[in-house]
Amino acid sequence: MNTMQEKTYWNNIDENYKTYPKLTSNIDCDVVVVGGGISGSLTAYYLSQYKLNTVLIEKNRIGHGSTLLSSGILKAYVDKSLSVLASLMSEKQAERAYKLCLKSIDDIENILSNIHKDCGFEKLKNNHALFDPFKFCHAVLKGASSKGVRIYENTSLSSFDYAPEQMRVNTDTYHITCKKIVFTAGQSALTLIKDKIVNLKPSSTIVTNKLSKFDGLEEKCICNKYNGLSYNIRILDENRILAQVHGTDNEQDLTASNIITALNNLLPNIKNIEAEYFWKCSYPETKDSLPYIGAYDSLPNCYFNLGIGGNGEALSAYGAQIIKDLILYDNNPDTEIFSFKR
Ligand SMILES: Cc1cc2nc3c(=O)[nH]c(=O)nc-3n(C[C@H](O)[C@H](O)[C@H](O)COP(=O)(O)OP(=O)(O)OC[C@H]3O[C@@H](n4cnc5c(N)ncnc54)[C@H](O)[C@@H]3O)c2cc1C
């Protein structure tokens, strides 16, 4: 069984992904995007469509953060029910957040059509969609690169400085002079935020062996509770199943064998399930299950597109559009829904 965190199912089936150089000189640009996961790729992609001179830096390798650990389920709804969400914000905002999940799925479909890629995208009857998050992250970034975005791997932001009219992103050796910085650095970016906005919970994922043809999973994706834990289950190629579980503080509950027991109970028609891949990580939860996107008061000229939570991947597509609007027009009608002040 493959248990290494840097090797999951996603980069095992797609070993020929593109690599990018390290930054080897001082450069300048309009916007630096910090972090090369799905949120950074989408942000760079949208900025590139509006001719903003953009540089993306990734401290390790593209797509090897949470993006590599995720389940690739684009949910049609927020993890909190509409009524609970409406109690945490206005009813209108809650309805809008629900609509934005659907819009983001359409946006992702449109991006794929623009860059002529498939990335396993499939819309389901229940309005969810499935895709390969790692392939998607790479494909979108390739699209951004063809529009002029410069991409550097193994290049980490170590600090940033403010100077009149410009900002400076410092890496270990070189610096990038820019007007704006967008942090898409996932959980690492939380160190810049004063308040505790995220609860980290343990999570485990298995990908099964190739199963013989089965009935009993009408939709290719189900999100269900079993023994009080939350399961996100989807079909992959070759009749494999991916099952991700979270919802407890106790890591001991999240073993591969417990996930298989849950699958045997939830999908009794499927026989001989074994785990071929297993990975563990922390699953960040926010109070309303929505990601944090936008400006942060104490950091002028900086923006965040933090694809956190169960809708993180879909909503980071809309997050990228919010960031683009804030940089170009200083305005987007949905900023309050995702704001750090909410
Ligand atoms: C187990 C699990 C399952 C999930 N499943 C789903 C799902 O099915 N659907 C969904 O919508 N969402 C899901 N999510 C959430 C999803 O993973 C995230 O929404 C998405 O992958 C986050 O992408 P990201 O680009 O924001 O972060 P990441 O993919 O973590 O990317 C951040 C990048 O920033 C880089 N970085 C950090 N610090 C620096 C620095 N100083 N300088 C340069 N680079 C830096 C990191 O190396 C990393 O590559 C899941 C999350 C988990 C944990």
Image (spheres, rainbow, N blue to C red):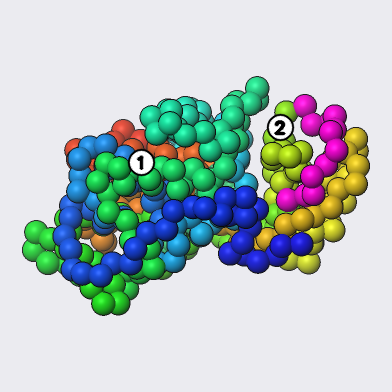
Instruction: Answer with mark 2 or mark 1, whichever residue precedes in sequence.
Output: 1
Residue at screen point 59% across, 29% down: 122
Q: Provide the secondary structure element on which disc 2 rests.
A: loop
Residue beneath the point at 18% across and 52% down: 30
Is 237 part of what is drawn in magenta?
A: no
Discs 2/1, front: 1
Q: Which residues are magenta?
A: 207-218
Crowdedness of circle 2 by 10 Å Cα count: few (<14), some, many (20+)?
Answer: some
Write down the quadrant of residue 79 in the picture: top right
What residue sits right under mark 2 in the picture? 220
Name above or below for residue 175 compared with residue 136. Answer: below
Q: Quadrant of the N terminus?
A: bottom right
- The residue at the far front in this view is 16
Picture quadrant of residue 46: top left
Left or right of 334 in this view: 83: right
Label 1 neighbour load within 10 Å: few <14, some 14-19, many 20+: many
The percent position of residue 209, horizontal first and vertical second, equals 79, 49
Residue 143 disc label: 1
Question: In the displayed structure, would residue 307 be above or below residue 143?
Answer: below
On whether residue 213 falls in the magenta region, the answer is yes
Marks 2 and 1 sit apart, C-alpha to C-alpha, by 28 Å
Can you see residue 331?
no
Chief SS of the magenta region:
loop
Q: Amino acid at mark 1?
A: Gly
Q: Secondary structure at mark 1?
A: helix
> Percent position (x, y) of residue 213?
84, 33
Q: Position of residue 177 (x, y in %)?
A: 16, 63
Identify the residue at image location x=12%, y=61%.
166
- The three-letter code of the residue at mark 2 reads Lys
User: In x, y percent, where is residue 163?
Assistant: 12, 67
Q: Which one is in front, 139 or 80?
A: 139
